[in-house]
Image (cartoon, rainbow, N blue to C red):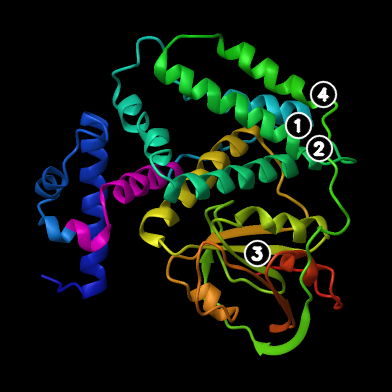
Amino acid sequence: MVRLSRAETQERNRAKVLAAARDEFAGRGFRDTKVDVIAERAELTRGAVYSNFPGKRALYFAVLADLAERAPRPATPPPDPGAADVLAAFARAWVARLPLATDSESEEARLTRDLLPEILADEHTRRPFAQLMRVNAILLGLALERRRPGRRLVRVAEAALTTLHGASQLAAAAPGFGEPFHIVTACAALLELDLDDDWPATPPITSQARPVAEPWRPPEATDLLTGRPFAPGDGVITVLGLHRASAFEEAVRAGADVTTVLVTSDPGELAPLARLAIADLRTCLDQAGAPDPRPRLRIAVDPTGELAAAAGVTAVSDATETAVRVEGGRIVARAEGYGACHAVAVGPGPGRSSGG
């Protein structure tokens, strides 16, 4: 028998815990599931479960994030959709997941119905989730703007996501309520509303970018928007805590190619929540055939802090807000605090590619 390394053993145990927890959460719901039963089902000790996940809620978020990231991607996305087509297809993909009147006791319904109550349970999860919803609205808005350029469409995206999240909650509380096709029609019609959605040329508070000459040797990361690994290269690198996650839009609106690195003081619980929120949106965007955002945008969660450290951010929190510009494989500018993403993006230098 081949002897596994410590890292391989831990990875195998983690997979066993996730599989066992998924079955328990689906069968019993979050509240009635016991960690001891998960450990027994995984043929591990209670300590082995807690060595991989700090608590039951963290494990619950990790199970849902893993499922969302493994969702199948469409083999043939719709050809050249317009903005209304993208928004309608996005909404259609969303409502297709809602439980029917006969599905209230299905495994999928039991698996997901406790998600929002657990997020709302305390400020520790509620505040990051609010920012993650802003991130999702920006991502959906950028996808719509690729098909209907000329104005910012993030407010339209916010209204659509509000409608769809509300539909999800009603479907859980009153399965069968409402006509899904009417929800799709209502979301598509939001594009015709004259919503006030101006973007200032300069943020009201902006820090000062300063020139530096530092090495840039980042580890490989996974892009949450594609699910594929990449090596962060030239462009603007934003390192943002989950209380400031949406600030990357400052760099995108300035025309820079952006790699956003999300960090947190509680990676055990909040990193999987971030993965889940973005993967959930990505699944519906894939079904809509939404084009990749331009300038190029990548988003990575950094639970170990290695990406942040490569950018010179050695201590992270949920309030972290740092941006650097990378040109020719070296960090050439840096800014911290409010407005850092804008300051670095509009600073001098020709580099505008975050390729890899």
Left or right: residue 166 compared with residue 26: right
Residue 97 in picture, x, y percent from top left: 47, 25
Judged from the image, the secondary structure of the residue bearing numbered disc 2 is helix
Q: Which residue is mark 1?
A: 81
Q: In 3D space, how far apart are the residues under numbered discs 3 and 2 (Cα atoms)?
A: 22 Å
Judged from the image, the secondary structure of the residue bearing numbered disc 3 is strand
Q: Residue at x 26, y 72 (%)?
A: 7
Q: In 3D space, how far apart are the residues under numbered discs 2 and 1 (Cα atoms)?
A: 8 Å
Q: Residue at x 77, y 35 (%)?
A: 80
The image's mark for residue 147 is 2
Kindly report which numbered mark, 1 or 4, lies closer to the viewer in this rendering. Answer: 4
Residue 198 in picture, x, y percent from top left: 85, 43
Magenta span: chief secondary structure: helix
Q: Residue at x 41, y 20 (%)?
A: 172
Kindly report which numbered mark, 4 or 3, lies closer to the viewer in this rendering. Answer: 4
Kindly report which numbered mark, 2 or 1, lies closer to the viewer in this rendering. Answer: 2
The N terminus - image quarter: bottom left
Q: Are marks 2 and 1 in contact (CB under 8 Å)?
A: yes
> Counting residues from the N terminus, which is met first, the one under dot 2 or under dot 4?
2
> Counting residues from the N terminus, which is met first, the one under dot 1 or under dot 4?
1
The image's mark for residue 259 is 3
* Residue type for callout 1: Pro
Q: In 3D space, how far apart are the residues under numbered discs 1 and 3 (Cα atoms)?
A: 26 Å
Kindly report which numbered mark, 3 or 2, lies closer to the viewer in this rendering. Answer: 3
Left or right: residue 190 compared with residue 18: right
Vertical relation: 160 (above or below) 43: above
> 10 Å neighbourhood of mark 4: few (<14), some, or many (≥20)?
few
Q: Which residue is mark 4?
A: 193
Q: Residue at x 15, y 72 (%)?
A: 2
Q: In 3D space, how far apart are the residues under numbered discs 4 and 3 (Cα atoms)?
A: 32 Å
Magenta stretch, residue numbers: 49-69
> Counting residues from the N terminus, which is met first, the one under dot 1 or under dot 3?
1
